[in-house]
Amino acid sequence: MVTRHFEIRAKLAAGATGNSLSSHAMAEREETPQDGSAERGLRREVRFPDTRWSLISDARATDAGARQRAVSELCRLYWYPVYAFARSRGCDPHQAEDRTQDLFLKFLRHDSFRGADQEKGKLRTYLLTAMSRLLTNEARRAKAAKRFPEQLAVPIERNGAEERLEGESAWTASATPAQQFDRRWAESILREVEMRLLREHEAAGKGELFAALKQFVPGGGGGKSYAEIGATLGISEGAVKVAVHRLRKRFKMVLHDEIEQTVNDPALVEEELRDLRAALVG
């Protein structure tokens, strides 16, 4: 049997998240504070040139290098919802890891995932359907690991995954496997939004500001008041309010962009946002 090597290119946060994407948190403030000193000079991140659907196209390319890069990025973004879905369908940890590998390795075959048609709309729905089909076909699943050469690896970092599952047990008990998948997908989107915002702030020399303010956007937790944060950063409470306002506005834009990259029609973005919001609060 071919020995599989798991190439680790990007580690995702291992801890369970308590993200909440409420309508209140998503709403942009009506008032615009005047003191903008805390945020001046923040450089906006250049929009990623590739959409998630274009990554799927690259994953079907004839060039092996392009396929590997595309699959690596798709797996980095979405491996955990897929892995957790396999666990919810009865796979043990090793089986779930194998099945997740099997799904993403299919992208490395030139003739695989022809059905991932943009006209079908949502990448989230496509991946869930594809994994469901894979899990129902025992014979095909058993042969999958033997069909790919050793050097074709996809990046899965399972360390901490079981701890995350255990930490999520409070809400998974009353959720179907599909509902669990949708919530974890939403949390993966939020993590990617947070990472983009962090990179933007660090590039502008404002990493400390983002670390202090991220509690005011969905998934960021909470705790300190504007006054306490201002005292820590050495800026006025008014400047903190301005910075929070702008961060929430930028968060909304980046979230919209992330969602837009997973659907083919801009008209589907709001529908997907509603679905993901419902998944997080459900």
Image (cartoon, rainbow, N blue to C red):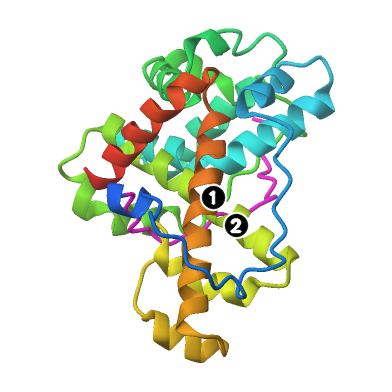
Residue 108 spot, x, y in % from top left: 70, 22
* Lateral position of residue 127 relative to residue 176, left or right: right
Instruction: Name the residue beneath numbered marker 2.
Output: 197
Q: Is residue 74 above or below residue 159?
A: above
The secondary structure that most of the magenta stretch takes on is loop
Closer-to-camera residue (146/20): 20
* Residue in view at x 70 percent, y 22 percent: 59
Residue 228 spot, x, y in % from top left: 41, 87
Residue most extreme to the left: 174
Q: Label 2 is placed on what type of residue?
A: Leu
* Residue in view at x 45 percent, y 35 percent: 82
Quarter the C terminus occupies:
top left
* Residue in view at x 61 percent, y 62 percent: 198
**Residue 57 lies in quadrant:** top right
Q: Tag 2's secondary structure? A: helix
Kindly tell me whether residue 158 is visible in this rendering: no
* Lateral position of residue 124 relative to residue 115, left or right: left
Instruction: Name the residue beneath numbered marker 1.
Output: 193
Q: Is residue 119 above or below residue 227?
A: above
Quarter the N terminus occupies:
top right
Residue 13 spot, x, y in % from top left: 51, 59
Q: Tag 1's secondary structure? A: helix
Residue 261 badge: none
State if disc 2 and disc 1 touch (CB < 8 Å): yes
Residue 225 spot, x, y in % from top left: 36, 81
* Lateral position of residue 249 relative to residue 84, left or right: right
Read off the magenta span. Answer: 1-21
Across the whole image, how many numbered discs are drawn on residues?
A: 2
Closer-to-camera residue (244/9): 244
Q: Residues within 10 Å of mark 1 (few under 14, many from 20)?
A: many
Q: Label 1 is placed on what type of residue?
A: Val
